[in-house]
Amino acid sequence: MTVSHFRRSMLCLPASNAKALAKLAILECDATIYDLEDAVAPEMKAAARDALIGHFAAGAKPGVEHVIRINALSTPWGEADLEAVARCRPDAVLVPKVENVSDLAAVAARLDQAGLTETRLMAMIETPKGVLNAAVIAEAHAPRLAALIVGLNDLRKETKVPRGPDRHLLVPWLMQVVLAARAYGVAPIDSVSNDFRDLVAFETECAEGRAMGFDGKMLIHPAQIEPANRRFGPSEDEIAAARRIVAAFDAPEAAGQGAINIDGEMVERLHLEEARKLLVLVSS
């Protein structure tokens, strides 16, 4: 499967929802998270696995990153979920409530035993231990670990921080996850926004998340895709600025220069590196 370079929008949907699975073909999210965990009732777990196997057998949408969120191996459903993963062969497996290195190591070992050595891991960071150990987890499992995804609903429950009009009380924990992810080359992904009808508040949260350094957001409704793609994607001004930086450093007079003046601003080669990365992303 061809994986998108962007993870601006990672839409999570119940694997048991046939209508939602069918609609994926027309949606423009960067990644799809097929949920076998929280969004699927215990009595529907087996049916959800069967539906997911059928969906992949029929041909999942190309050009999108396909991720399966399994139940923890400590639950009655985790092993059966990994058997379904072996049949679906997604791009990545998302492990819930990761708190330590061993939580991912156990899943990685099962994937390797099934011959899925190229299948990447993603970790839900949604408990106090998960936040505190985020850097250790990222260091231990990079480069196979593709993303750390924050789960604020569970984190609020575990810490007794109530839902409010904004997330200012949670910013230190969110930034801790971003820092851990950036230190080890892992993508930090912001938490879901539960009120999918309030797109104004959602856009504000997206802007806040991008300012904190997140690459994108986990979504729960298709209406959130467009604003997430727009807010977490590069603007036309940012793309134009990247092109100016590359052109300026490519000029003969910039040869051997570590920093140059572009429109009255000193620009270093580290900015050139970032500009080139951005232009590769938007051209792919």
Image: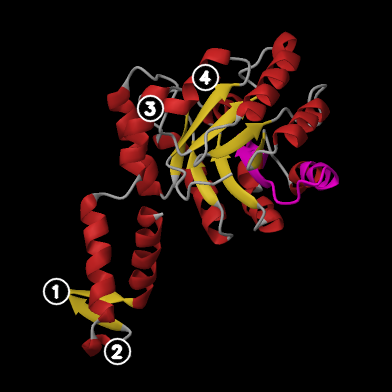
Q: Secondary structure at mark 2?
A: loop
Rounded to the nearest angstrom, the CA distance separating label 1 from label 2 is 19 Å
**Are the residues at dot 1 and dot 2 in contact (C-beta closer than 8 Å)?**
no
Rendering coords of residue 48 (x, y %): 68, 17
Q: Split into 4 quadrants, where in the image is the C terminus?
A: bottom left
Q: Which residue is mark 1?
A: 264
**Residue type for callout 4:** Ala
Rendering coords of residue 94 (x, y %): 65, 37
Q: Split into 4 quadrants, where in the image is the N terminus?
A: top right
Rendering coords of residue 198 (x, y %): 32, 20
Rounded to the nearest angstrom, the CA distance separating label 1 from label 4 is 52 Å
Q: Which mark is residue 224?
A: 3
Inspect the magenta stretch and tell me whether residue 127 lies in it. yes
Q: Which mark is residue 255?
A: 2
**Residue type for callout 2:** Ala
Looking at the rendered image, the disc whose residue lies closer to the viewer, 1 or 4, is 4
